[in-house]
Image (tube, grey):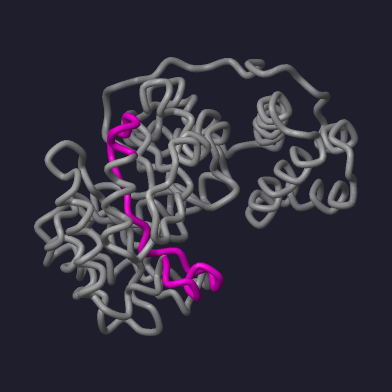
């Protein structure tokens, strides 16, 4: 979810109960200890208690392959106040993989273990270290070995996206394979991939046997999905599907938050990017996207969405509930 789920998006998505924790976009680690400004840019929450405004904890995510560099940057993150370190071995992007990051490490479980162990040895006594993988790079034969490697390295939790890197985001998601991994690991396993609805959520949990799920693209496509899941878990009541007006309100608030610090042309692009995620699962979002995709000014874009520009803070916040089973977690995928 690089370039999409920034601090403002995390704020908006966690204003209603549903998410138990969130993850930043990845901080790319190559061979050097990065300066504090890089971490603060990716995780402004470091300056405000490492939570979203409604109190949802935020883990700082690192992506890289050099164990020493990952360890040094985990220490930097800890010194800046990070409350958890998440390691990304799941990114399928060709550019990232060509530069030996993300899912490229899944070709060799020993590299996964070395990376996790280095970070765990650096900060594991003070911060939890978690990881995310896919079912492999080109095939699934090493899926369990990579998962076991992350656990052996010291990961306290593992998120598994239910496809290989070469499968990308093509359906179906193989949730049953996550179940095979979960049964062999001594740490909690979280299911991820193709959870777009309440029915998908329950099917993913049933086939994987996992207690928790992680939402990425599904949370962007339907910003109220996690809230509806948790409400159903708590009450047995199914809330109505998210209507276009609710989606448009979130996009307008997102624009208002972004325009306080960014040029309007960039804000326009960011809003279109989020709308693009919505359109594949909502007919009205698709219609609006086609109507506004060539509009290059923010006011015109918001008018096309059915909203006038607003000031930050317009959307009312609901109180954070602490009871009930967790619906899932928000992350960079």
Q: Position of residue 27 (x, y in %)?
A: 45, 50
Towards the viewer: 83 or 29: 29
**Does residue 228 appear anywhere in the picture?**
no
Q: Position of residue 60 (x, y in %)?
A: 37, 42
Q: Position of residue 246 (x, y in %)?
A: 65, 31
Residue 136's image quarter? bottom left
Question: How many marks do you count on the picture?
Answer: 0
231 w.r.t. 200: above or below: above
Q: Residue at x 32, y 74 (%)?
A: 106
Is 227 situated left or right of 213 in this image?
Answer: right
| Residue 95 drawn in magenta | yes
The range drawn in magenta is 77-101
283 w.r.t. 297: above or below: below
Is 74 situated left or right of 32 in this image?
Answer: left
Q: Residue at x 25, y 56 (%)?
A: 158
**Does residue 71 appear anywhere in the picture?**
yes
Residue 115's image quarter? bottom left
Towards the viewer: 127 or 76: 76
Is 293 situated left or right of 87 in this image?
Answer: right
Q: Residue at x 33, y 58 (%)?
A: 132
| Residue 40 drawn in magenta | no
63 w.r.t. 99: above or below: above
Q: Residue at x 49, y 25 (%)?
A: 15
């Amino acid at each position: 979810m690089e370039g999409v789920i920034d601090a403002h998006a995390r704020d908006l998505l966690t204003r209603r109960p549903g998410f138990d924790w969130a993850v930043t976009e990845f901080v790319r680690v190559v061979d050097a200890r990065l300066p504090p400004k890089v971490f603060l840019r990716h995780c402004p929450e470091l300056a405000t208690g490492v939570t979203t405004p409604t109190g949802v904890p935020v883990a700082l995510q690192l992506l890289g392959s050099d164990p020493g560099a990952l360890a040094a940057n985990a220490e930097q993150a800890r010194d800046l106040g990070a409350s958890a370190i998440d390691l990304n071995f799941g990114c399928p992007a060709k550019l990232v993989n060509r530069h030996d990051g993300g899912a490229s490490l899944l070709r060799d479980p020993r590299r996964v273990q070395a990376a996790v162990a280095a970070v765990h040895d650096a900060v594991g006594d003070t911060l939890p270290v978690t990881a995310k993988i896919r079912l492999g790079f080109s095939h699934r034969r090493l899926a369990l070995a990579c998962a076991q490697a992350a656990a052996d390295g010291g990961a306290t939790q593992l998120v598994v996206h239910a496809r290989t890197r070469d499968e990308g985001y093509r359906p179906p998601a193989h949730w049953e394979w996550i179940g095979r991994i979960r049964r062999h690991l001594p740490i909690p396993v979280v299911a991820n991939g193709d959870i777009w609805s309440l029915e998908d959520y329950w099917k993913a949990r049933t086939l994987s046997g996992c207690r928790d799920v992680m939402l990425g693209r599904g949370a962007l496509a339907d910003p109220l999905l996690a809230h509806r899941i948790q409400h159903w878990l708590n009450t047995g009541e199914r809330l109505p599907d998210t209507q276009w007006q609710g989606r448009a309100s979130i996009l307008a608030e997102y624009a208002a938050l972004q325009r306080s610090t960014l040029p309007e042309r960039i804000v326009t692009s960011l809003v279109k990017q989020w709308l693009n995620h919505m359109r594949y699962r909502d007919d009205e979002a698709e219609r609006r996207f086609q109507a506004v995709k060539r509009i290059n000014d923010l006011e015109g874009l918001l008018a096309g969405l059915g909203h006038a520009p607003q000031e930050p803070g317009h959307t009312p916040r609901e109180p954070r509930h602490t009871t009930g089973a967790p619906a899932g977690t928000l992350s960079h995928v």
